[in-house]
Amino acid sequence: MAETEIRPTNFIRQIIDKDLANGVHAHVHTRFPPEPNGYLHIGHAKSICLNFGLAQDYQGQCNLRFDDTNPEKENIDYVNSIMQDVQWLGFQWDGEVCYSSKYFDQLHDYAVELIQKGLAYVDFSAQDKVREMRGTLTTPGVNSPYRDTSVEENLSHFAKMRAGEYPEGHCSLRAKIDMASPFMCMRDPVLYRIKFAHHHQTADKWCIYPMYDFTHCISDALEGITHSLCTLEFQDNRRLYDWVLDNITIEARPRQYEFSRLNLEYTVLSKRKLIQLVTEHHVSGWDDPRMPTIAGMRRRGYPAAAVREFCKRIGVTKMDNMVEMSMLEACVRDELNENANRAMAVLDPIKVVIENYPQDKSETLHAPNHPSDESKGTRELSFSKEVFIERDDFREQANKKYKRLVLGKEVRLRNAYVIKAERFDTDEQGNVTTVYCSYDDQTLGKDPADGRKVKGVIHWVDAATAVEADIRLYDRLFRVPNPAGADDFIEAINPDSLSIVRGVVEAGLRDLATGEAVQFERTGYFCKDVDSQSDKLIFNRTVELRDSWSESTPA
RNA sequence: UGGGGUAUCGCCAAGUGGUAAGGCAGCGGGUUUUGAUCUCGCCAUUCGUUGGUUCGAAUCCAGCUACCCCAGCCA
């Protein structure tokens, strides 16, 4: 697909253009800073495309930095999956992978600097007491009794914190700012807390860990980040971001700008909820094709280019938003329509017996792999007396809006002959099992010679060479547009989000590579699942084809 | 009157004082051996609301209203 050519315009690019024009910066340096405590999802894709996209367009740099200041929630598996997902999306960070934990020594020294300046103190108040003294949204807080401890004593206490002489929760290092500030995050925020936790990068070297607000701004400055982009909920935190940099000895002055996070209909994008879906087994794992994770979308068959295009189309603003799933699906279809080869598969088969076709005959037909791209070549299709067609594609009677096989009428078998339904068998329940047809042997690759019109075309699979396959059909994971807003989002899970049908596919599909996209004509785009075996094919339906036909359309 | 933000078509989103881009969805027509694709056309006299400034306002000013975020030793 031609990814949208027009260069995006948004408020962040305008800020950068201005900074470059005014000489505030000579180049652009961004960063994508995930905490390795979960898998990346489509919301992260927005941030990734923004940060790496900016670096690309302005010929600048973009770092990948793990914001790993809370070892209790993080692990190395998440680190690895995040690197893999960023690369799958088509981006490569500049230089080595960065970790906030790499700056722990410097961070510690800056904390000491603040203490020495009388701008930080060790507070031994109990946690609930700290909360109490912070005040509320409408009432100011009160100063901690430890707020005026001498610099020397604070230095000593902090050294003991670091040395492991205090148990977890016994005390914390706090910035001395303003307990009456209208910004809650400025009421003497905690800078360091005690955690006797093993860290995936620094092992057991530390028992005190810096908080996000103290770490992020310094990490940005240390890496020479020029524009530090984050989501809206950090707007208040910007005051603290600037306060820290204003009060320590550091040259660089990165600036933080906030944009709105992505919300997608019929799914959830909070890490806590996604983790719950996985741990409670509502889905098969982080890469379940119904998940909005990068890994899930990849397994589902969404091309990386489609995800990138989606991020481009939704734009970047400060407005709260809820994007429709149709926007994402349109990007996926655009990409797949252009690049996926075509094939035929029958999801709910009934048999067609062509009575006037010679009993032992079998022929090899040729079909284009793509309707409008000849360079994709052709494939062979076997054809014989018995073929499978879709149950929905035959009716005993129907109005003229129905363009498929009807008893006594003709229809074209895609890439093959025109057939006419003569009679049919049913089982005890009345379900059609076999349709007996006749075929016009003069209609291969051409219209009937007598000029009669055959408007319908249906897909089929030769019964003699058909290969059975499990086909996984996915629907939205939740029944409501905004499950995150429900009282209990688990209750809103769609019980029918996955259905597996036993279908038949044309023989050539046995050799399809895992993950390679294919369009099953008239039914949708699919890809072979990683669980697929050579003797047990499994396909995932990536997305359905657009379908403007509706049953209720008057005849 | 805690503070910080945001309000432009069903959903995204341009627009930055000169008279409302685009995409998705939807609706009609054409082409078509995929009810797909492709293609053509339609889809905001109006920008949360009320006033004001101006020759001229979505854009400037004032007042309302609605929604989101902040009281983790999470990020």
Image: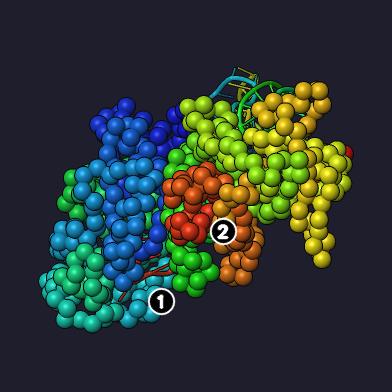
Quadrant of image for the C terminus of chain A: top right
- Mark 2 chain: A
Q: Residue at x 63, y 46 (%)?
A: A462
What's under tag 2, amino acid-wise?
Answer: Asp
Gap in Å between the C-alphas at discs 2 and 1? 59 Å
Q: Secondary structure at mark 2?
A: strand
Q: Badge 2 local density, few (<14 within 10 Å), some, or many (20+)?
A: some
Q: Badge 1 local density, few (<14 within 10 Å), some, or many (20+)?
A: few
In the rendered picture of this protein, how many numbered marks are placed on residues?
2
Dividing the picture into quadrants, the one containing residue A155 is bottom left
What's under tag 1, amino acid-wise?
Answer: Glu
Q: Looking at the picture, how far across and down is residue B40, in whole percent?
A: 68, 21
Q: Looking at the picture, how far across and down is residue A119, in whole percent?
A: 22, 62
Q: Looking at the picture, how far across and down is residue A365, in whole percent?
A: 59, 35
User: Is A124 situated above or below A337?
Assistant: below
Q: Is residue A450 visible?
A: yes
**Residue A450 placement, left or right of A15:** right
Residue position marked by numbered label 1 in the rendering: A132
Residue A300 vs residue A30, the one in the foreground: A300
Residue A165 vs residue A85, the one in the foreground: A85
Going from the N terminus, do you reach mark 2 or mark 1 first? 1
Residue position marked by numbered label 2 in the rendering: A470
